[in-house]
Amino acid sequence: MNFKELKKKAAGHTYSSLNYVSAEDLEDVIQDFFVLCDKGVFIISEEKKQYHVLWACDDFSFVIDNIRKFIDEYNDFREEKRIFIEFVQPKDVVGLAKIGFKIVSEWLDYWVEDINKIDIQRERFSQVFTISEDEYYAASEITLRCAGQSREYEGEDYTFVREWARTRNSKVLVYKQDENVCGVCFISIYRSASAKANVLWIRELAVDPVYQRKGIASVLINKALEYGKNCGAYKSFLAVDRENFGAVRIYEKAGFHPKADHGQINMAYGCLQRTLEGTGV
């Protein structure tokens, strides 16, 4: 079955984690755990640090049964390599917890429904710039210094920063103080035939720990909103872990609000659940 057929099969089920999967995500599939049947789709993709469960079904017991089989039968399973599953429904958390999984993050979508109604605070905008090529490494280093300040956040490498800066409709904003980059924000515009469907995505924001709690994150968010507004975006959204309380406060102050009580719940087996000690912003 080719990739398009697999996605079509998955779309026929009530629940699925395959909506945002690319063909490249399936390059290292463990063939013994590629299940495709009337009950659903179950795939284990082996990655550097984890085994990634990709799935689609109507009854989640199908997924749990296959995970049990993987844990019991896969001889190369190593404790230091976790099993990771995304997009778990709230009703299925208990079932996974019973076999040893723990919640490692829950991403909530926060929205500004109309950027034009936001009172954009423009203080210190003179310190925000579009990133230059010689600042890619500095931006990457800032994100890496923030690793672990929010659950599951590990930062970005130089290649990611470079590619994002060069991608059409995407931009990297940097906050500079004394000629030093001390904050970075990755944004993108999603365009549509309808003006009211144009969306600004704030993908990621990081502030060097040395400069945190100085209002830099708020400056970058407001500058991103102004950029989106000037580019014709009507709405804006971002995703934040439920337990990143400091970031949530900053986003709500800027005018973002969650759309639902629950977000994207991600769980893992064979790892210690991280304790959030800082906010990262």
Image: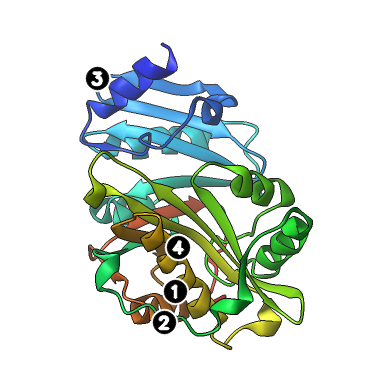
Mark 1 or 4, closer to the camera: 4
> What colour scheme was applied to this rendering of the protein?
rainbow
- At label 3, the amino acid type is Asp
Lower position in the chain sequence, tag 2 or tag 4: 2
* Label annotation for residue 121: 2
Above or below — where is 88 with respect to 153? above
* Label annotation for residue 276: none
Question: Of helix, strand and loop, which one carries label 1?
Answer: helix
Q: Is residue 272 left or right of residue 93?
A: right
Disc 1 to disc 2, C-alpha distance? 6 Å
Measuring from the top left, give residue 141's x and y in whole percent.
Answer: 74, 64
Within the image, what quadrant is residue 180 found in? bottom right
Lower position in the chain sequence, tag 2 or tag 3: 3
The front one of 244 and 124 is 124
Contact between marks 1 and 2 (CB within 8 A): the answer is yes
Above or below — where is 213 with respect to 185? below
Q: Image quadrant for the N terminus?
A: top left
* Residue at image location 48% in from the left, 30% down from the top: 22
Mark 2 closeness class: few <14, some 14–19, many ≥20 residues within 10 Å: some
Measuring from the top left, give residue 231's x and y in whole percent.
Answer: 40, 55
* Label annotation for residue 38: 3
Name the residue tied to disc 1: 222
Disc 2 to disc 3, C-alpha distance? 53 Å
Measuring from the top left, give residue 60's x and y in whole percent.
Answer: 27, 40
Disc 2 to disc 4, C-alpha distance? 13 Å
Q: Can the viewer see residue 238 in this picture?
A: no
Disc 4 to disc 3, C-alpha distance? 47 Å
Question: Of helix, strand and loop, which one carries label 4?
Answer: helix
Q: Can the viewer see residue 186 in this picture?
A: yes
